[in-house]
Image: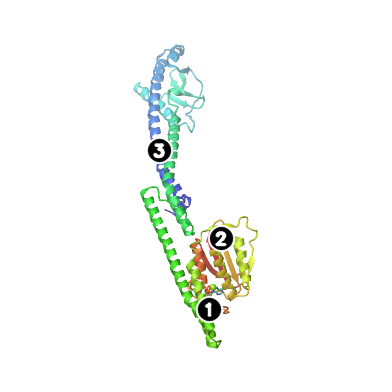
Amino acid sequence: MSFELRRFLPRSLYGRAALILIVPIVTIQLVVSIVFIQRHFERVTQQMTGNIALEVEYMLRQVNAAPDLAAAQQVVAGLVAPLALRVELPSNRALSDTRDFVDLTGAFVIEALYQSLGAAAATAGQPSNPVLGVDLVAERGQVLLLLASDKGPMLVTMDRGRVSTSNAHQLLVLMVVTSVLMTLIAFGFLRNQLRPIAQLARAAEAFGKGRALPYRPRGATEVRAAGAAFLDMRNRLERQIEQRTLMLSGVSHDLRTPLTRLKLGLAMLPDDDEVEALRRDVSDMEKLLDGFLAFARGDALETPQPTDAVQLAQQAVENAHRAGRNASFDPPVPPLANPQVLLRPEAIARALENLLNNADRHASQVVLSLSLSPKNLIFTVQDDGPGIPEDLRAEAVRPFARLDPARSQNRGMSVGLGLSITADIARSHGGTLRLGHSERLGGLKAELVLAR
Ligand SMILES: Nc1ncnc2c1ncn2[C@@H]1O[C@H](COP(=O)(O)OP(=O)(O)OP(=O)(O)O)[C@@H](O)[C@H]1O
Ligand SMILES: [Mg+2]
């Protein structure tokens, strides 16, 4: 299929199925009806015209056989009533073959008149065709036929209804009406068949954004099987996430008890450099465990709820200030009409905290902004620090990845989980974490993209 053609095809399954259904039916109907109508009306017209031609030919023979014009006129006068024709003899009208362009059977009428009368004249021993012209247009609903007789030109007029059937459109109307009706019924059935697929797609999409829509497999066997497989997968994934959360938080929690004991023990010891170093180690380990816990919580257990995105961002900046960190909020211009977005507020707050934390650690100027489109919500954190070189960005997002420690101002110990947790949170909202270069401040630009 060429690219050009694909552009005009409907994108939705429903549209395509309808197309597959309708195109062949319409084509078959068109071909069959055109061929049938043409054949049918051609034959009928020929037969009807042939009959009239016999009558006209009979009259023409009588006229030719009459001794003079007056006798011929008498003959004609006797024939017009029983034959239901109108005759003008002699006539001074000049006729050429004319018919309406849309008059499909008109061509057959003209052709059949020439043929029948010509053939009759030939058998009577006359070499030339007596027909001089046939006009279907000059008088409404009438056929004007000009003939050459021995007594001069003879104009015969008859009802159009006698030479061709006129209700060709009835068949067409009937056909169009039935096809429209059948297509509508087919549409109804088709929609019912496609609805379960659309439902499955919605449930899968929602799950990708971290929302569990109620879903029950239904529809045709194959769709039902796909639906059941999806449910299985969803349950397995949910179980796995839960297990990972439980295990990691269990480990972190169990490690915390001996660590606390260790801390207490160290507090009892007299202050000297060695003990001080040990205390630092212990506090670093505590921080590591906190990071672990945050990572483990994964926020999979929090349910999404409509949240004011602007307020969330403002709150994140305020929290950063309270923790003594540098950050500013750049509210969207113009103000958002409806900043409500379905998300997990705690998780997003943690993600923003991570990004602000990182920026503050590496830079002096930090700006948080956000943008909202029908498809997604993007929080952007920009700073004026050294940024992350393009080839190291993927590495920075990996768990426990700390880039060159000399680059950071080393305020506080780092675990290397911040970006990884943030990316995880973005993924669980059907989005991603994008790292780039900030044109505005020259440092890192971290975009938290969330699907709506
Ligand atoms: N704003 C930034 N500017 C420059 N480098 C950054 C920035 N943010 C992160 N990085 C680099 O990416 C690495 C990974 O960041 P990440 O947040 O995952 O871990 P961390 O900050 O080192 O530790 P944690 O956040 O767990 O305390 C950091 O060690 C740092 O080298
Ligand atoms: Mg960090």
- The one of 371 and 235 positioned closer to us in this rendering: 235
Which residue, given by chain and number where applicable, does mark 3 sit on? 29
Q: Residue at x 60, y 57 (%)?
A: 339
Query: What is the C-alpha distance between the residues marked 3 and 2?
Result: 50 Å
Q: Residue at x 38, y 24 (%)?
A: 50
Which residue, given by chain and number where applicable, does mark 2 sit on? 377
Disc nearest the viewer among 3 and 2: 2
Q: How would you rate the neighbour count of disc 3 (Cα within 10 Å): few for under 14, some for 14-19, many for 20 or more?
A: some
The mark nearer the N terminus, 3 or 1, is 3
Disc nearest the viewer among 3 and 1: 1
| Amino acid type at image mark 3 | Gln
Secondary element at image label 2: strand
- The one of 77 and 17 positioned closer to us in this rendering: 17
Q: Residue at x 51, y 72 (%)?
A: 290
Whether pointer 3 and pointer 2 mark residues with C-beta atoms closer than 8 Å, the reply is no
Q: How would you rate the neighbour count of disc 1 (Cα within 10 Å): few for under 14, some for 14-19, many for 20 or more?
A: some
| Amino acid type at image mark 1 | Ser
Disc 1 CB within 8 Å of nearest ligand 1 atom: no
- The one of 136 and 13 positioned closer to us in this rendering: 13
| Amino acid type at image mark 2 | Leu
The mark nearer the N terminus, 3 or 2, is 3
Q: Up-down: is 287 above or below 151?
A: below
Which residue, given by chain and number where applicable, does mark 1 sit on? 283
- The one of 354 and 363 positioned closer to us in this rendering: 354
Q: Residue 361: x and y, percent?
A: 58, 75
